[in-house]
Amino acid sequence: MADLQALAEALIRGDCKTVEALTNQAVDEGMNPKEILEEGLIAGMNIIGKRFKANEVYVPEVLIAARAMKIGMEILKPKLAEAGVEPLGKVVLGTVKGDLHDIGKNLVGMMLTGGGFMVIDAGIDVSPEKFVELAKSEGAHLCAMSALLTTTMPQMAEVVKAAKASGLDVKTMIGGAPVTQNYADEIGADGYAADAATAVDIAKQLIAG
Ligand code: B1M
């Protein structure tokens, strides 16, 4: 049986080969991909985040762990997607302008895909104009924004404004470490989620509503 604790530890070490092998092993053994994601990959990255904050590790270690996480995520992506038979709705997902953090955004994207949504990943450093342009061209139901910096959070307000001004029937959802429900209320976003799993529930509520 694949050891998810060992997977988290390999991710923390930035040991790409072991992350790849253990993720593949867990998948081959039929382990739930959501469990592999949450108890292996996310668990490891959360520890890296705490250590970075405490100055116990620095940017290079974080980047190496992030690279290992991406390898595990690539393996899990199709498995998570397999769970969704019919798309529940279309989501334009991106990290807002000026912000290059994409690990949380990618997790949200995978969880949404696994939850049955079609995700159009706009990437990082996405301008309000780009969010709206994609929502229009793709016929999206939801603009989902991630921000990890207090300095880039105001870009979320700009996307909310642009989405409303566009006249499109598109909802907005925000998230990321510094983002709160209060902030969502303040800028008029339709939804807020504290983590990737909750993002799926909120997206379902917004699209159903
Ligand atoms: Co950055 N960084 N970083 N960083 N970095 C933080 C965010 C920081 C808190 C670290 C710190 O000082 N303690 C700090 C921000 C301070 C602030 O604004 N208050 C910070 C800083 C300052 C910076 C730089 C400015 C550093 C510098 O250059 N001086 C710089 C900025 C670059 C830029 O964006 N313009 C920078 C750079 C980097 C790296 C490139 C080295 C790397 C990013 C690599 C990558 O993403 N590809 C990095 C990382 C990894 C971090 C930390 C350590 C970890 C972030 C992460 O991936 N967490 C972070 C410290 C921390 O958070 N403790 C830090 C794991 C991830 C799974 O969590 O993204 O929060 P998170 O996502 C969660 C939820 O928030 C939620 O779901 C996810 C999973 O459940 N969620 C959503 C996220 N988006 C959502 C959207 C939703 C719903 C939920 O709906 C749409």
Image (cartoon, rainbow, N blue to C red):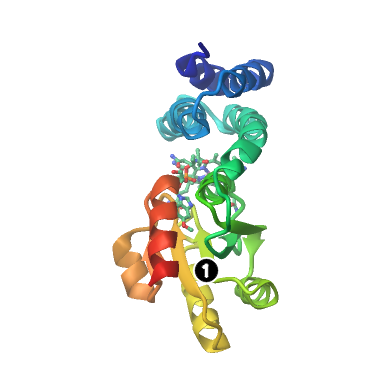
Q: Residue at x 53, y 19 (%)?
A: 7
- Quarter of the image where one finds residue 181: bottom left
Report how many numbered discs are placed on residues in the image: 1
In this view of the protein, can residue 126 be seen by the observer?
yes
Q: Farthest residue in the front direction?
A: 85
Residue 46, image x, y percentages: 44, 32
99 relative position to 56: left or right: right
In front here: 14 or 133? 133
Dot 1 beta carbon under 8 Å from ligand 1: no
Residue 146: % across, % down: 51, 57
Residue labelled with disc 1: 142
Nearer to me, 43 or 179:
43
- Residue located at (62% from left, 76% from top): 132
Please state if 47 lies on the left or on the right of 81 as rendered.
left
Q: Which secondary structure lies at badge 1?
A: strand
Residue 174: % across, % down: 44, 62
Give the amino acid type for the residue marked by disc 1 in the picture. Leu
Q: Quadrant of the C terminus?
A: bottom left
Query: How far across and down, in percent of the image, does residue 71 sit?
Result: 67, 30
Q: Crowdedness of circle 1 by 10 Å Cα count: few (<14), some, many (20+)?
A: many
Q: Is residue 60 above or below residue 133?
A: above
Residue at left offset 62%, top offset 71% = 131
The correct choice, above or below, for 162 with respect to 63 in the image is: below
